[in-house]
Structure formats: structure tokens, C-alpha cells
Amino acid sequence: MNISKNVKVTLVKAYQGATTGDLNCDVIDMSGFEGVAFLGAILTANAGNYVKIQESDYSNAASAADLADTKLVTTNSGDAFFTELHKPLKRYCRAVVVRTASTAVGDVYALQYTSRAAAVSHGSTIASELNVSPIAGTA
């Protein structure tokens, strides 16, 4: 299996400078996918800084609801987070980074997998290529 042809990668929130308050990532349409993982970094470790996942029936995240047990707190400043939602119950979801202590947040990516379509197209900000058994030489 080739990840680049079977996992859709989308930048859902670019780097954000240090501040407090909730940081809502872009909404992901899960139609045609079995699951999604969110990958990013919270730059200041604090019990009040964490990521969670929300679901909604609407593409604008109207009435988005937190999902039970999706709160993930990073242990060390600068640690990456990786949180996954498998078989969502609603069509739309997003990651939310909660910041009660001032922190910057690195880029956050959504990795959607198990597409019902044969191949996937990545988000518009993602450059990708597949290399199969290349020989040694100049890149």
C-alpha cells in the first residue's frame, strides 16, 4: 500500500502565534472515508492546553459537539499530538486546540484514510510524489 495514494492529507490550520482561546481547525468532510487522524504540535505544555475532536451534521460546524474521551494533553513543550477518529457518527468533524495558557500551535494536518475511491487528492497546500524503488543517484 502507498500512503500517498491512500491517505488524503490536508492542512487544516496553519501555525498560530502564542495566545489563549480555542483554535478551531477547518472542518473535514468525512464522506467516503472511514477515519481521520489530526497531527500537529502544541508548543507550551500545560494541563489547560489540549486538543479535542468535534463532530457536526453541518459543513460550517453549526452545533459542533465535543466527542467523549477525545481530549489529548501533550506532556512536554513542543510535543506533537496525533489523535484519531475512526468511523465517525456524523459527516463533518474538526480538531479544536484549547489554550488556557498562552501557547503557539504548529501547523495542524488532517490525514483521512480508507477512502471508498481508488485514489485520493491531497489538499491544495500539499505537494506530494510517490517514489517506487528508485536507484541511487542525485535527488
Image (cartoon, rainbow, N blue to C red):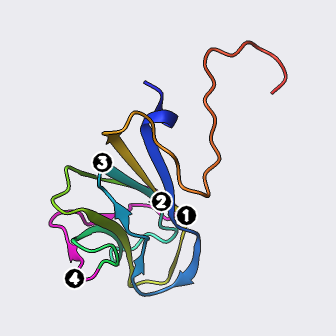
The three-letter code of the residue at mark 2 reads Gly
- Does the magenta segment cover residue 65? yes
Q: Earlier in the sequence, mark 2 or mark 3?
A: 3
Magenta stretch: give its range.
62-80
Q: CA distance from mark 4 to mark 1?
A: 25 Å
- Residue 130 vs residue 48: left or right? right
Name the residue that disc number 4 marks: 63
* Circle 3 residues within 10 Å: few <14, some 14–19, many ≥20: few
Name the residue that disc number 3 marks: 32
Tag 1, which secondary structure? loop
Residue shown at 27%/74% (left/top)? 58
The label nearer to you, 4 versus 2, is 4
The three-letter code of the residue at mark 3 reads Gly
Name the residue that disc number 1 marks: 107
- What is the quadrant of the N terminus in the image? top left
Tag 3, which secondary structure? loop
Depth check: give the residue in front, 20 or 64: 64
The three-letter code of the residue at mark 4 reads Ser
Depth check: give the residue in front, 97 or 44: 97
- The label number, if any, that marks residue 40 in the structure image: 2
